[in-house]
Amino acid sequence: MPVTLADIRAAATRIAPHIRQTPVVADPDLPGLSLKCEYQQETGAFKLRGATNAILSLPENARANGVVTASTGNHGRAVAHAAKQVGAKAVVCLSRLVPSNKVQAIRDLGAEVRITGASQDQAMIEVARATRDEGMTEIPPFDHNDVVAGQGTLGLEILDAVPDVQTVLIPLSGGGLAAGIAVAVKALRPEAKIIGITMENGAAMQASLRAGHPVEVTEEASFADSLGGGIGMENRVTFPICRALLDRVVLVSEAEIAAGIRHLARAGHVVEGAAAVGHAAILSGKLTLDGPTVTILSGANIDPGLHARILAGADAPETP
Ligand SMILES: *Cc1c(COP(=O)(O)O)cnc(C)c1O
């Protein structure tokens, strides 16, 4: 495995001063189910763990030159916040199409924003230029050993909170979260099952696992927007780990994700769609609870207007 339990333990020590140990609470309506409330992490998502570990693992001279990413979502927020905390410069490259509130949110986290071109591809070109000409280091969102090890620290916290866990439900996109947790949990409790869950609309890891190599899928609008995007055609880390360690992948529909968001909101957890996929699978009957189960509430960053529409009954995302 490209990432080991020792890497994850080292990451836990390294990032401990910079992240929150988020609570694990019971779901009052679903006996046996525990919720890892990672949406209460600083910046509203677990991505802070991987980004912090990756930046702290850089050699001193690389850290001094700064880090760069093109993500507008939870990863971009995490890189901006983590860099600021450890005194490194962060640059986030965005296209002109990114809405101004998102741009401002990244600036507020202390990052330099560079707006280049009219597409994500052009933002990526600026990332490549900054790494080449300015000696900056790109922090990738999932396919990187130090990022995976950082996300894996959640696996250690889950085992501390629920030592007899039988099943862990993990929102799945590029697979950094699933790979990291799977390495930790399978090393310490091999009998536990690891189940990746993602939306029917654009399940890139599932399609890649079926094909036996990374494949591209068409993206559609989803309530679980943080689960969008591919796994990278040159994937080196998360695809092999997910192939080796995931016991199963479950796909959920938009209506099922909406039901998960509503269930969690009634219990006081305001989460984004990606965080509700475990509940989507259970409430729909696609998964049956069997022994102590933990689901990762991975993020909080949902537009308040969208959250309100879903609570009012919306069952399908608006297509852009
Ligand atoms: C990024 C993200 C995921 C998926 O993580 P991967 O490592 O890409 O599989 C799940 N939930 C939230 C909230 C995220 O931001």
Image: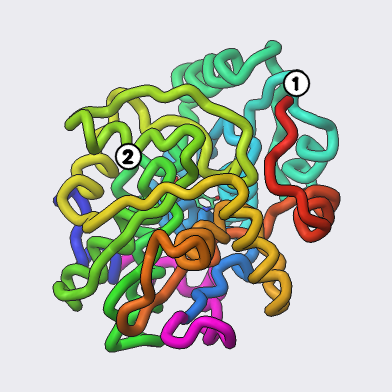
**Does the image show residue 78?**
yes
Q: 116 and 169: which one is in front?
A: 169
Seen from the viewer's position, the closer of residues 80 and 314 is: 314
Q: Classify 158 as above or below 272.
A: below
Say if 224 sits above or below 33 in the image: above
Write down the region rendered in magenta. Answer: 10-33
Label 2 sits on residue: 206
Question: What's the residue at 64%, 48% (across, down)?
Answer: 77
Q: Is residue 55 left or right of residue 156?
A: right
Q: Secondary structure at mark 2?
A: helix
Dot 1 lies on which element? loop
Residue at x-position 48% and y-position 56%: 52
Residue 269 percent coordinates (x, y): 68, 72
Q: Residue 81's x, y, as percent? A: 63, 53
Q: Is residue 96 magenta?
A: no
**Amino acid found under the numbered disc labelled 2:** Gln
* Disc 1: CA contacts within 10 A as few (<14), some (14-19) or many (>=20): few
Residue lying at 47% horizontally and 24% vertically, measured from the top left? 131
Task: Tell me if mark 2 has few (under 14), some (14-19) or many (20+) residues whose alpha carbon lies within 10 angstroms of its own.
Answer: many
Residue drawn at 57 percent across, 29 percent down: 220
In the image, the residue with mark 2 has its CB under 8 Å from the nearest atom of ligand 1: no
Q: Give whichever of 247, 54 is nearer the camera.
A: 247
Q: Amino acid at mark 1?
A: Leu
The residue wearing badge 1 is: 97
Q: Is residue 94 shown left or right of residue 290?
A: right
Percent position (x, y) of residue 185? 25, 71
Q: CA distance from mark 1 to mark 2?
A: 29 Å
Closer to the eye: label 1 or 2: 2
* Residue found at the very far front of the displayed protein: 285
Position in image of residue 97 (x %, y %): 75, 21
